[in-house]
Amino acid sequence: MNILSKRRVALGAVFFFVGLCFASWAARIPDIQAKFDLSEGQLGTLLLFLPLGSVIGLPLAGWAVHQYGSRKVVMIGSFAYAMTLPLIGLATTTWLLTPVLIVYGMLGNVMNISLNTQALDLEDKMGKSILASFHGLWSLAGFSGAGLGALMIFLDFSPALHYAIVMAISIIIILSAQGYIVKEKKVAEGGGGLVMKKPDALLLRISLIAFLGMMAEGCMFDWSGVYFKKVVQSDPSLIALGYVAFMGAMAAGRFITDKIAARFTKVAVIQVSGVLIFIGLSIAVLFPTVVLATVAFLLVGLGVASIIPLSYSIVGRSKLYSPSVALALVSTISFFGFLLGPPLIGFIAELFNLKVSFALIAVAGLGITVLSSVRKAVFLIPVKASPNRVK
């Protein structure tokens, strides 16, 4: 195994650890709700502080990576992220938990920007598309974290002990990988500083595509179970089937995205992804049976899989911004799609019904295809020394 392959394995392990930490936190949310005797409304309010921290962390991450390099930010951020997780379980009051969640959200996006900057640098050196496979490992870690969480609950381990075990696993991964997390090439472009500026034409277009993709992703994360319960009216034991189909397809799709993009170009894959989201959600709306809705959610998972990694890969080669700043700009805009999508679905469902809400997200999928199909020179950004063109 050559040095670039070893670096790819090490970086993939760090992506996995970040996903494992996030999934482990999510797996114990019901226990945290019970610990503090929170109503659904109170829990919802508490959970808002994590995305608040994420929004704060995005511009700071772009600035830090641009100023100090992604390696330094990855190493400091990794230990901080792993060691903050047990603090969530150790918090004795919601007043103590709230700032911890804000910091955890901030660190999550510090890792997001710095790791993707590392991945883009490695992608350039390897001369082929590999970013989606790293996001696939993050998704795979989601399954692993959920499974580990179920085991911890079965063994009656407290969230604090559970999180401490995950922290120990994470530190082993970080220490094993640190030798292969290297300083990325120095970029000559400007565009440093805190990310508070208007995106150029390329970044704006990709940001809108990522925004719609994250809106669809948020829809599936938060509403797939409700859809199976209220619209599909499935047996209670099958309510999670749509979510599992979506998550499984999204994880699998990310592992094959790079090869498909190398063969057909990244923009072509994004175009097809939007069509898959549209077809999948249209099937779910028009034919809400268990079998067809499961197939539909699987198609949506395949569609969503490539949007973010390929969007990051394209904007990471912006001529006007450093990779970290370009990533932070796109992440900031797309993240609002993840935040606004689920509440928007609830609002429209309240006015009409859940089918109408899902039909709206289907149209958003079609919007991805339209936005990526407009022929503009700004999309023609090749990967250095690679046949994997973006066109």
Image (tube, rainbow, N blue to C red):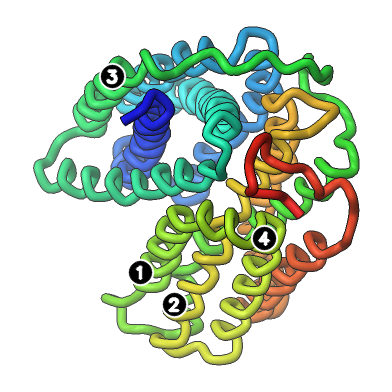
Disc 1/disc 3 C-alpha distance (Å): 36 Å
Are the two marked residues, 1 and 3, in contact with CB atoms closer than 8 angstroms? no
Mark 1, mark 3: which one is toward the viewer? Answer: 3
Disc 4/disc 2 C-alpha distance (Å): 27 Å
Q: Earlier in the sequence, mark 3 or mark 4?
A: 3
Q: Earlier in the sequence, mark 1 or mark 2?
A: 2
Mark 4, mark 1: which one is toward the viewer? Answer: 4
Q: Which residue is mark 2?
A: 228
Q: Residue at x 78, y 51 (%)?
A: 208
Q: Residue at x 32, y 45 (%)?
A: 27
Quarter-of-image position of residue 171: top left
Q: Type of residue at label 2?
A: Phe
Task: Please provide percent x and percent y for residue 235.
Answer: 31, 83
The quarter of the image holding the C terminus is: bottom right
Q: Type of residue at label 1?
A: Ala
Q: Which residue is mark 4?
A: 270
Task: Please provide percent x and percent y for residue 44.
Answer: 52, 46
Q: Type of residue at label 3?
A: Ser
Above or below — where is 274 with respect to 261?
below
Q: Circle 1: is it few (<14), some (14-19), or many (20+) Cα within 10 Å?
A: some
Q: Which residue is mark 3?
A: 176
The quarter of the image holding the N terminus is: top left
Q: Is residue 382 left or right of residue 79?
A: right
Q: Is residue 149 left or right of residue 115?
A: left
Q: Which residue is mark 1?
A: 240
Task: Please provide percent x and percent y for residue 135.
Answer: 48, 44
Are the two marked residues, 1 and 2, in contact with CB atoms closer than 8 angstroms? yes
Q: Name the secondary structure under disc 2.
A: helix
